[in-house]
Image: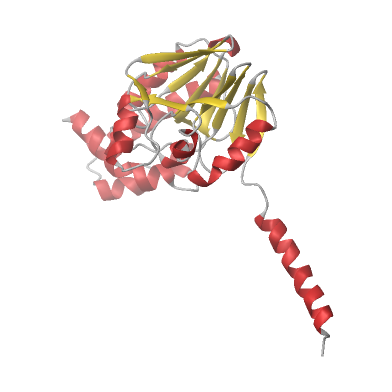
Amino acid sequence: MIPLVLRGALLLSLLVPCAALWAQPRLGIEQVKDGLYMITGPGGNIGVRLTDEGVILIDDKFPQDFEEIQSLIASVSAQPVRYVINTHHHGDHSGSNAGFLEVAEIVAHKNARENMLRGNQEGLPRLVYTDSTAIYMGGVEVQAFHLGTGHTNGDSVVYFPDLKTIHGGDLLHTTAPFLDYANGGSSRGWVSTLNAMLALDFDTAIPGHGGIMNRRDILNFRNQMESVRQRMAELIRAGVSADGASEQIRDPGLSWTQAEDGLFMRRSVPGFYEEIAAELE
């Protein structure tokens, strides 16, 4: 029989690695350019713009991430968060709004706020805009534009003109996008919005999910959106049903339709089919 002291020591030795595992950080932070960082991990990518008078965040992930986000910001700046810009309403991008409203102002497009309100989300932005707005703080300008529909009807593109960098929210994705038709998403609108985005003077882009992108990446993203739209139109003209389109839209040349997580296929195709079918009538 193992003595009680040894049994206690053995139990502790088993628990310590487990506790260490639980304590592993969910998020990480990396520098994009001088004065601009990106917080990564589960949920949408956060942009962190530093100024001498405070920090401006772009999105804020899930509710449980509030404290870790604050800790990561403190590792690169002694300034507090003054503003948060939500690129859209989805909870993996606006989930910590309630926490940040205690210390900062939250800005979003008016449609994004309405989508949050309809979805009974916490942390509604107190400041909204229609076409464009800007924050000026500590000698830094951060602009936000609503360039049209796409992922939703309330997407914001955030532009850091001095750094020639944008944060595109989920208008940009490095695997496969999701068209939120329940909240005004549109593939046709998305193409136009991307064209308007490309008119901005930038060389670097933070996507909603995935690694840093450049202009060529966004051109390729737009081109694939156009190609997937064309592919769906061909299927509809050939008489393929909405049910059949989910499989037959798969094409080796279109990475979105081959994505392992099936995001584009599983969630977007029913509405996508209806959108393209309506255009062909």
The answer to whether residue 255 of the structure is visible from this angle is: yes
Q: How many marks do you count on the picture?
A: 0
Q: Residue 251: x, y in percent?
A: 43, 40
Q: Residue 96: x, y in percent?
A: 48, 39
Task: Please state if 164 lies on the left or on the right of 24 as rendered.
Answer: left
249 and 152: which one is in front?
152
The quarter of the picture where residue 144 lies is: top left
Looking at the rendered image, the quarter that the N terminus falls into is bottom right
Task: Please state if 81 lies on the left or on the right of 72 as rendered.
Answer: left
The answer to whether residue 250 of the structure is visible from this angle is: no
Display colour scheme: secondary structure
52 and 234: which one is in front?
52
Looking at the rendered image, the quarter that the C terminus falls into is top left
Task: Please state if 116 lies on the left or on the right of 53 as rendered.
Answer: left
Tell me which residue sits at (45%, 41%) in the image. Answer: 95
Tell me which residue sits at (65%, 57%) in the image. Answer: 22
The quarter of the picture where residue 21 lies is: bottom right
Work out which residue is located at the far bottom of the displayed protein and give it: 1
Q: Residue 59: x, y in percent?
A: 49, 31
**Residue 246 drawn above or below residue 186:** below
Tell me which residue sits at (42%, 41%) in the image. Answer: 91
226 and 112: which one is in front?
112
Tell me which residue sits at (75%, 74%) in the image. Answer: 11
Work out which residue is located at the far left of the displayed protein and give it: 281
The quarter of the picture where residue 217 lies is: top right
Q: Residue 53: x, y in percent?
A: 60, 17
**Residue 204 drawn above or below residue 248:** above
110 and 247: which one is in front?
110
